[in-house]
Image (spheres, rainbow, N blue to C red):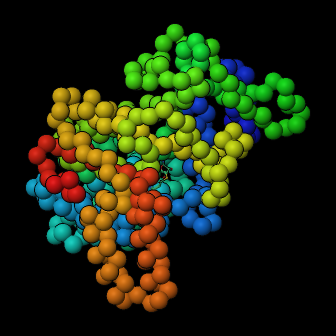
Amino acid sequence: MSAPSLSDHLRGRIESEGPLTVAQYMAEALSNPDFGYYMNRDPFGIEGDFITAPEISQMFGEIIGLWCAVLWQGLGAPAPFNLVELGPGRGTLMADLLKAAAVQPGFLDAARVHLVETSPVLTAAQEKTLSGVPLKTPPQWHRRLEDVPEGPMLLIANEFFDALPIRQFVRGRDGWSERLVGVDAGADPEQGSLVLQFEMSPPLAGAPEVPDDFQDAAVGSVFEVCPDAQAMVQAIAARIARSGGAALIVDYGHPSSAIGETLQAVKGHSFHDILADPGEADLTAHVDFGALAEAANRGADGGAVQVLGPVPQGAFLERLGLSARAAILLEGASPEQAEDIRSAQFRLTDVSAMGSLFKVLALAQPGLAVPPWS
Ligand code: SAH
């Protein structure tokens, strides 16, 4: 029988197994089948908790659609090919992408759309968003990338990797410890709600997850590792090395591995206590693009995949023609629509908004020309 709430479930799990790693906590909070944040809600938009680039403007998906069309041609227009998206949200990016890529004759007929999604609510939203797209073969849904059939592939992922669970290591005087989530023994359980608290593991004999450069970091330093992200990128690179294709990863994060604590909770467009409402707030952490690039090289097993970037999102979109696209949309726009278009362009590209914190990393088979790098 399942527990009546995520708090009860977490309390039971901590009582029987001991404190959880931050990654175990994050996985429960986001993806517990009954109570996980993504499992039973649509979190996007003004009414929701946060807004993503494809929900800000159609221009984001259109630019990525043109990128896909160019790469597909560069691959020799394989038919069929797998067009894969990880964590498609409402399906808006895929719908806008397909609309733009349709200008390339044959693209829609050749595309086998595979969506990797764990949330039943968002799967239903994606189905609705994509129902009108004239694909030759209907989209297929999978819970894991491993379930997507092999073959030449173009893969995209926007704000997917920031939702994967991270572990946190903290430097103490006697070496590294792992930050854990336990129950506050002093809190009155009769109060009803679970009182979670961070605690530290005893100092570890070694912390191989922390790169050599940071092993002697100052006391109090935090290093975050996302094992699932590394495994996922390794698997993507291995697929590209085996069957050809490319991948585009867009997310917020740092260009190379760094000391720093970035785990955050967001609810109703504001920061929220990380432990206060598991399952009710979004939890994300900055993506370590340096670690992803290394994982890609490991997956490619000896350099059979190009790893390009990361470049800032603003530069990526501008170099692929965002201003030109905005100018075309502005031609037929009412004053109100024009204001929306200008504001969207600013939000997607300005360094004070998403333009610099968000970054784009590409993986590609050797020899394939990949804009804006080529
Ligand atoms: N790409 C979308 C949504 C980003 S939110 C956009 O830009 O708007 C993160 C998405 O990843 C959601 O669709 C969520 O349900 C999905 N997701 C989170 N963890 C996942 C996992 N482990 N496997 C598959 N999908 C996951």
**Quadrant position of residue 240:** top left
- The residue under the point 30% across, 59% down is 316
Q: Is residue 136 visible?
A: no
Counting labels gives 0
**Quadrant position of residue 301:** top left
Q: Does 116 appear above or below 371?
A: above
x and y percentages locating residue 1 in the rendered image: 70, 33
- The residue under the point 31% across, 82% down is 328
Q: Is residue 200 visible?
A: yes
**Quadrant position of residue 44:** bottom right
x and y percentages locating residue 269 in the rendered image: 62, 59
Q: Nearer the viewer, residue 195 or 176?
A: 176
24 sits to left or right of 290: right
- The residue under the point 41% across, 71% down is 345
8 sits to left or right of 370: right
- The residue under the point 32% across, 70% down is 322
Quadrant containing the C terminus in the rendered view: bottom left
x and y percentages locating residue 122 in the rendered image: 51, 56
Q: Does 242 appear above or below 13?
A: below
273 sits to left or right of 332: right
Q: Nearer the viewer, residue 238 or 346?
A: 346
Q: Does 319 appear above or below 333?
A: above
